[in-house]
Amino acid sequence: MSEKPLFKKTQYELTEEERIIVENSDPLYLMVYNNTVDQMYELTPEMKQFMEKYPYRSQDEIRDPRQIKVMAHFFNPVACQDWIFTEHYDHQNGQNYFYGCARLFDDIGWEWGVMPSLEELKRIDLGPAFGHLRIERDMSVEVGDSLYNVLMGIDQNGLYDLGLMSRNLEDPDLVSDFEKQKFALLRNVVDDEMFDKVVCYLNRENATIDDVFDIDSYYYDRDNCFDEEKINDYFETHEFPGYDALLDDLASDGPIDVSAKEAIKALGKGNSMDFGKEL
């Protein structure tokens, strides 16, 4: 078997015999790997159509992540780094630049901005310590997929980082899931008594959990994500009915959200919170 045609193949094109040869040879494996990554960066007809349909700022006014379309998702295979292309930004000096959202550091989260060009991403070599791996394209993401689906597959917290919260979703079932997630997160930062008081406050004042719990701060500054002072001040002038009375109150057709009812009822089964479906 000659080596020349083997060098030109990608991982997806190898026969079983060729795969065995490649896997037993570091230089051959790297060559085939590079061929595979190079193919990931080729602009397909679908990508070119997307670039024409979605130029820079064409999706600015869309707040529902299910309606924001994605062209591609690129990622670092050995670190928490991602680039999601949502609009074609510019073509200059023979390179295509895109606008979208990126996560470059795990402790910072997702941000909107101008992405590196395809050519710049393609040239990144992660070095010998990582086998000269490169930035890869997520082949499970199809051109035209929604940002919601892509982020749910990568990092659901990105929906919060980018301001794509439950208020931007029209589907009541999705909103309910987001509210359940907020209650679950709140449960991690308060004790049982305070959690009961929060639910009682929401029920009495026809409030929402956003009035006392900042979901964005939860990921950046957990010491300041919950307004404990607001709840304590409220119950200095209002009587707290206690857990049993609160359950009876929630059993009525009050204004509190159904997810809050489920949350407080779960307390009766123990301290572990089971909210069913995850986001």
Image (cartoon, rainbow, N blue to C red):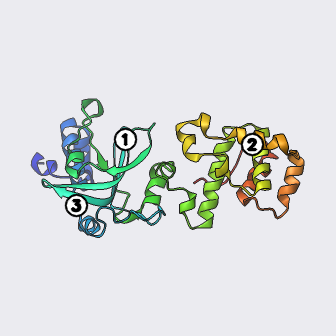
Q: Which residue is depicted at the point 57% across and 54% down?
A: 279
Please, is residue 79 above or below residue 261 in the view? above
**Mark 1 residue element:** loop
Q: In this view, does 7 lie to the left or right of 175?
A: left
Q: Residue 130: where, in percent of width, then height?
A: 29, 33
The mark lying in front, picked from 2 and 3, is 2
Q: Residue 89: where, in percent of width, then height?
A: 26, 58
Disc sitting over residue 231 in the figure: 2
Q: How far apart are marks 2 and 3 (CA)?
A: 55 Å
Q: Which residue is depicted at the point 79% across and 39% down?
A: 193
Please, is residue 231 above or below residue 276 in the view? above
**Mark 3 residue element:** loop
**Mark 2 residue element:** helix
Disc 1 target residue: 104
Res. 277 in view: no
Q: Residue 52: where, in percent of width, then height?
A: 25, 68
Q: What's under tag 2, amino acid-wise?
A: Ile
Q: What's under tag 1, amino acid-wise?
A: Leu
Q: Which residue is depicted at the point 12% across and 53% down?
A: 93
Relative depth, front residue between 232 and 90:
232
